[in-house]
Image: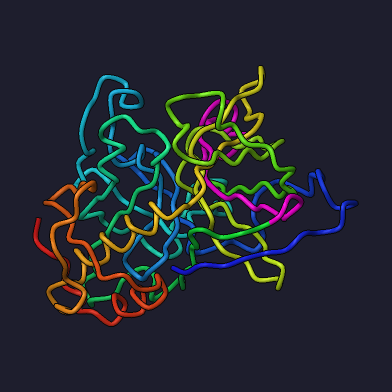
């Protein structure tokens, strides 16, 4: 995890819809979440055992929990990296199915701040001690990234609502994308529930429920890509497809959340990243420890070298 910047693109490139459809080639680090063996959400491997997703995929608050409040049981959750469609049109798991063992969301999310719709899941190793990222690779996320109107935004996920839930659309098993240039639109002033974050709106995009938690990439001025948010919310068209999507921009609060979680996950092997108890963050097992201030990339490198034993719940 790191910070980055981009500069302005030519005015002629603004406001353009570029493409959408099923990814080809497949992006293996992008995962589909299953809950109780049904398609649930999307996410991204950002470290070999750590999946970035949306908070509402892991924890139901009063606003988004539909009557349920609390963490959804990790035991009910599986992630399938690069979930795809086989030759018969059915779902396939080319990189295996992986059990979720821990879930983390910002404490503000549990207190009805919809602008903090970010979550992290940790998966267990296979019988040989391997993690999914060992086979798929990982992608990099950025907080406080700077990019201009007209920057290319590429969103990926596993939509599984409306028409996407039908056999014609492979029952949500296909990895889908929307490729746009961002026109600068945001929804900060329309919904008090999400107003604490900068709400990136990308339109048009037909992805809908099930794509939540999938990565929102931006292309920086140097041509490189990085994740600057996840699919959080959206508005549907009359035909059931999505009209546009809303993503909560990764600001400095996301950086604090990320560092806090990584400190918790790796602290036994790396005491140097252990700090005092962090106020304002919630985990499914205990309070999350805060990390010393350093760049996200340094801490991510440290966590990747840490002992692979997942802390007991």
Q: Quadrant of the C terminus?
A: bottom left
Q: As displayed, is residue 271 above or below residue 103?
A: below
Residue drawn at (40%, 70%), measured in percent from left and top? 296
Q: As displayed, is residue 68 above or below residue 116?
A: above
Q: Residue furthest left?
A: 312
Residue 215: horizontal and vertical position, in percent? 52, 53
Q: Residue furthest right?
A: 12
Q: As displayed, is residue 39 above or below residue 52?
A: above
Residue 177: horizontal and vertical position, in percent? 64, 49
State left or right for residue 170 relative to residue 96. right
Kindly indicate the quadrant of the structure image that contains residue 240: top right
Residue drawn at (65%, 50%), measured in percent from left and top? 22
State left or right for residue 53 relative to residue 189. left
State left or right for residue 47 relative to residue 274. right
- State which region is magenta: 148-172
Whether residue 54 appears in magenta in the rendering, the answer is no
Whether residue 171 appears in magenta in the rendering, the answer is yes
Residue drawn at (47%, 32%), measured in percent from left and top? 195
Residue drawn at (29%, 46%), measured in percent from left and top? 105
Count of numbered labels shown in the rendering = 0
Q: Quadrant of the N terminus?
A: bottom left
């Amino acid at each position: 995890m790191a910070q980055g910047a981009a500069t302005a693109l030519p005015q002629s490139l603004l406001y353009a819809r570029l493409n959408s459809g099923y990814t080809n080639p497949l992006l293996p680090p992008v995962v589909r979440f299953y809950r109780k063996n049904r398609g649930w959400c999307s996410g991204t491997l950002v470290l070999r055992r750590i999946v970035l997703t949306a908070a509402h995929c892991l924890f139901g608050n009063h606003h988004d929990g539909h009557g349920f409040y609390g963490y959804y049981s990790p035991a009910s959750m599986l992630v399938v990296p690069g979930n795809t469609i086989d030759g018969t049109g059915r779902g396939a798991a080319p990189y295996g199915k992986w059990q979720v063992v821990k879930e983390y969301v910002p404490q503000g999310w549990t207190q009805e701040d919809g602008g903090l719709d970010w979550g992290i899941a940790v998966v267990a190793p296979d019988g040989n001690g391997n993690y999914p990222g060992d086979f798929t690779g990982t992608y990099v996320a950025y907080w406080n990234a700077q990019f201009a109107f007209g920057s290319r935004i590429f969103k990926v996920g596993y939509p599984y609502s409306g028409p996407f839930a039908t056999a014609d659309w492979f029952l949500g098993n296909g990895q889908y994308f929307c490729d746009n240039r961002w026109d600068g639109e945001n929804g900060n002033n329309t919904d008090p529930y999400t107003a604490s974050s900068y709400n990136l709106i990308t339109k048009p995009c037909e992805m809908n429920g099930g794509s939540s938690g999938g990565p929102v990439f931006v292309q920086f001025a140097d041509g490189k890509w990085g994740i600057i948010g996840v699919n959080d919310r959206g508005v549907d068209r009359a035909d059931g497809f999505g009209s546009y999507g809303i993503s909560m921009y990764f600001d400095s609060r996301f950086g604090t959340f990320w560092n806090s979680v990584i400190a918790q996950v790796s602290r036994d092997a790396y005491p140097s990243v252990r700090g005092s108890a962090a106020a304002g963050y919630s985990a499914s097992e205990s309070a999350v420890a805060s990390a010393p201030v350093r760049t996200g990339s340094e801490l991510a490198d440290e966590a990747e070298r840490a002992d692979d034993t997942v802390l007991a719940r």
